Image (cartoon, rainbow, N blue to C red):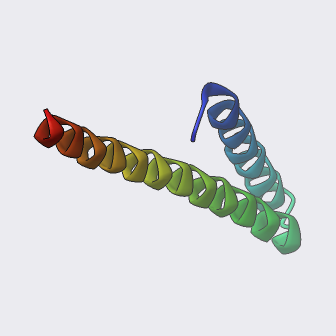
């Protein structure tokens, strides 16, 4: 599911969002600040979905392993 490339993309998007938010704050540009916060939230959601997918896969692997052990 989640791999290193996705993690890098998410961190880059999060960093870009923080930069936008900071620039918007310094320049008193509320729209830019809000866009930065939205970018950060989007990156956090993507990361959360990837982590959830990894956990679902792990749980599925455990269940499959248990069934395979019972067959033996």
Query: Camera-side residue: 24 or 68?
Result: 68
Answer with left or right where residue 21 lies relative to residue 62: right
Query: Camera-side residue: 13 or 46?
Result: 46
Query: Camera-side residue: 39 or 72?
Result: 72
Query: Camera-side residue: 13 or 29?
Result: 13
Answer with left or right where residue 65 lies relative to residue 11: left
Quadrant containing the N terminus is: top right
Q: Position of residue 52 (x, y in %)?
A: 44, 55
For the view shown, which residue lies furthest in the top direction? Answer: 4
Residue at the spot 70% in from the left edge and 29% down from the top edge: 5
Above or below for 42 versus 70: below
> What is the count of numbered marks?
0
Q: Position of residue 49 (x, y in %)?
A: 54, 57
- Quadrant of res 31: bottom right
Residue at the spot 13% in from the left edge and 32% down from the top edge: 72
Residue at the spot 82% in from the left edge and 73% down from the top edge: 30
Q: Position of residue 66 (x, y in %)?
A: 18, 43
Residue at the spot 25% in from the left edge and 42% down from the top edge: 62
Q: Position of residue 20 (x, y in %)?
A: 81, 52
């Amino acid at each position: 599911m989640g791999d290193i490339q996705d993690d890098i993309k998410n961190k880059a998007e999060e960093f870009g969002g923080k930069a936008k938010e900071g620039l918007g704050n310094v320049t008193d540009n509320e729209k830019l600040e809000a866009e930065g916060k939205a970018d950060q939230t989007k990156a956090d959601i993507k990361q959360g979905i990837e982590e959830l997918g990894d956990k679902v896969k792990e749980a599925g692997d455990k269940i499959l392993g248990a069934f395979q052990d019972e067959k033996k």
